[in-house]
Amino acid sequence: MAFNHLPAGVHDALVPLSVTPVTDSMPMAENHRSDRPPADPASQPGPGTVLDRLAAGPGRAARITHTEHLPPRAGRHARWPDRIRPEVLAAVRAAGIEHPWAHQARVVEHALDGDSVVVATGTASGKSLAYLVPVLSTLLDGSEAPNGRGATALYLAPTKALAADQLRAVKELSRPLGTSVRAAVHDGDTPFEEREWIRQYATLVLTNPDMLHRGILPSHPRWSSFLKALQYVVIDECHTYRGVFGSHVAQVLRRLRRLCARYGSSPVFLLASATAAEPAAAARRLTGLPVVEVADDASPRGELVFALWEPPLTELEGEKGAPVRRTATAEAADLLTDLTVQGLRSIAFVRSRRGAELISVIAQERLAEVDRSLAGRVAAYRGGYLPEERRALERALHSGDLLGLAATNALELGVDISGLDAVVIAGYPGTRASLWQQAGRAGRSGQGALAVLVARDDPLDTFLVHHPEALFDQPVESTVLDPDNPYVLAPHLCAAAAELPLTEDDLELFGPACGELLPQLEAAKLLRRRTRAWHWTRRERAADLTDIRGEGGRPVQIVEEGTGRLLGTVDAGAAHTTVHEGAVHLHQGRTYLVRSLDLEDSVALVERASPPYSTVARDTTAISVLETDIEVPWGDGRLCYGSVEVTNQVVSFLRRRLITGEVLGETKLDLPPRTLRTRAVWWTVTEDQLDAARISPEILGGALHAAEHASIGMLPLFATCDRWDIGGVSIPLHPDTLLPTVFVYDGHPGGAGFAERAFHTARTWLTATREAIASCECDAGCPSCIQSPKCGNGNEPLHKRGAVRLLTVLLRGAAGASEGAGASEGAGASETAGASEGAGASEAAGGPGASGVSEAAGDPTTPEAPKAAGGPTTPDAPKRAGHPEAAGGPGVSSAQGQAPGQVPDLPPPASPPGPPVP
């Protein structure tokens, strides 16, 4: 019997990581751009008062498990460096900023000295001004060249929306400078008639990594004058470039540096990041250059009251009669309603598209009961809306017509939402860095602010609200990315060769893995070596070999069948689980039923309907070990790290009653399987260890399964991942290890560094897992400890006490493990040796393990990811699917008709497109 857990749709995904990044734009600190008059801080209640009002309802005070008070902080000013052009300083003063904060002045000094620098300070600390001042000053110098463009700068944002927001800020700041600074956005929405002007005359081009990858670099001869004069490359929100997406961007930046060198320029890189551990090391890994770190935040901060909020238990029962808490979705909707009634500007961050819709609908209904005029002042904001819908919501928020929003990170990445009074976070966002970024969205005008983290019924959330020290006494996480991942590196070597033939001198730039990959690319007839260089051999565009977002092909258009009206889109990789035939789709509070899904034409036809149920996709999964890279003893057991192959297929969907979650029926689906080769950490136990733990054969499967559920839920506390970016399998006798084994693996082709991080922090990670299970007050297991919302066997079997005893014995053996072998916190670069062994390794491993059935709990959802820019996309590339917390119903039902053995909780991503290497 085996148990597998990866989110529905991750088998469709080379996933952008859900770090829930937050933007910060010019102007900043107390100098905000706004079309509305600022609120009088004296007229606003303090955050403590606001929290007291929220807690005044029946039984609400008991829901607050901890309150953290962060005192206000005074700012520290400095002087602008003398080398800044006086015209630029005058423009800054005209914007209301007389003196910079100390960290801003340091960034400017390093930039003018030619040092690449990363500024990693808090939200609203003025990072934008820190990099704009040296850029504008240098562009002003360049305007005095004979051609008027002696210096250029490139700005990279993770989304088109953020680039557009920054363009408005740049134009406002540089207005006194006249035509010396010519800024323009160049992305997939830029009209073709404007693109030639941008190439020839723009001095500051704002774009995104996608357009750089697909448009600018492949057409570099047309951009030669711009690249020749390139002085600065600004990388905004660089903390978003992590995992597989960050690894792709790292290689795109290496290609940019290579072409700049070809045209005689060597730009300075200016990076802006959220507060993060070791930002200089992460920036070096991203750019491949030495980077100076500026992380001492000198900006002022208002008082922040941060409350941890645990929803109450309900009368409902989940699997095996387990108690069920009220959902974070419902609780967040109540809080957003109360804040709006108080007239406070607030935002509720939620992890899924459907969750955003539900929170706004619930809040609107409850506000209408209080005052009909208030119902229209709350809305949802998510990806998948049409551009005109998003722009209208942004304008309403900016003008103050909207008081509250339920939003995914589609809003966080695109719009300046300064001046909020409160933030409600529906569920731990995955990392401490993301948590603080979201909390920092309130109080951006310097006034006091309230942040409330509402826990989901989930092991990690439950652990955190009862262990506040894990949030408030620990540093933020390090960024994880692996540019040497062969699935990432191979297509970029092809793209680089198509731009300019690759020489041996270039190999150092792209990393040591090039030596192994180039012969494979030659054998695949993608590259050909002529004399001393490798050339691209095909007619197709090499840049189309990979989608750096890993979203996998054209978005699926959701079309109303009767009218032909385009309602929105869903990422191609999520289509199998969210818009399959018979799926229920929610759009702006209206419900639709999917009548057909055409994968070839990327169209889902829907019709208006009001079914009394939601739909949940289910799948089967198999796993096999390809190669073990590292193996260390943990007593008689083993802790291992290496390569695995996971095969997944969506096979059916359940219809669940909306209120109770009762299963109404199951319908079979005929969708193609998908295969993933990735990296995993796994541990085994021996018969003697089972005897020591008093684990009999009857409870072995349940103990392993419970330990696996909880370990997946706890890993985001130790790696910069989301629970839905990782998968797991537990099996009492795996055919490759011949022992009881638990796997946890990256949901990305080639791996994303999470499993490696898990290996290097295994002792701490599994100790916290054991504590989370043991400290839970339930008797036999509940969603707060060992039950998973994605379990393919309806959370059967699970054995809570057996899991605690098993982990106790395992960790007793780990105490004797050598430091660095699953015991230390340090994690180096991912090892990829053996990742290219292909079928031979699979055959040697004995083939895949037993397969089973998985399901995605909750209604179809799609987590937000940065949207790709213009240009073509690569068919069949995968994309992560949705989170289960959307509908907020009770636990999932028992699986029906599954094969005995492996039970997937979260499905794996598909084989990557592009070159048939690794």
Image: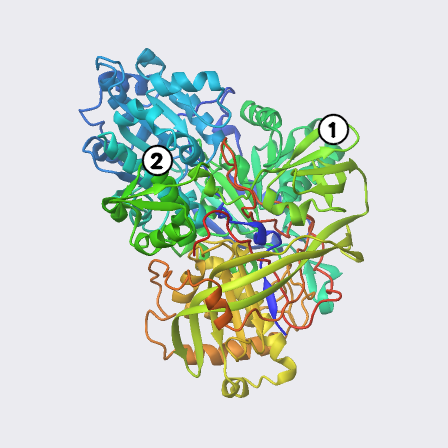
Which residue matches tag 2? 499
- In this orientation, which residue lies closer to the viewer: 552 or 479? 552
| Image quarter in which the C terminus is found | bottom left
Is residue 418 shown to the viewer in this render? no
| Residue at screen point 55% across, 44% down | 552
> Amino acid type of disc 2?
Glu
Q: What residue type is labelled 1?
A: Gly
Location of residue 862 in the rendering, given as x and y in whole percent from the top left corner: 61, 45
| Residue position marked by numbered label 1 in the rendering | 564
Which mark is first along the chain, 2 or 1?
2
The colour scheme applied to this rendered structure is rainbow
Specify whether 304 is left or right of 182.
Answer: right
The residue carrying pointer 2 sits among few (fewer than 14), some (14 to 19) or many (20 or more) residues within 10 Å by Cα, namely many
Quadrant of res 649? bottom right
Label 1, label 2: how many angstroms apart (C-alpha)?
41 Å
Viewer-proximal residue among 107 and 860: 860
**In the displayed structure, would residue 69 be above or below residue 807?**
above
- Measured along the vertical axis of the image, is residue 9 above or below residue 730? above
Residue shown at the point (39%, 19%) measured from the top left = 198
Q: Quadrant of the N terminus?
A: bottom right
Tell me if 620 is positioned left or right of 242 in this view: right
What x and y, as percent, mark residue 197?
39, 16
Q: Where is residue 797 in the image (x, y as percent from the top left)?
A: 67, 73
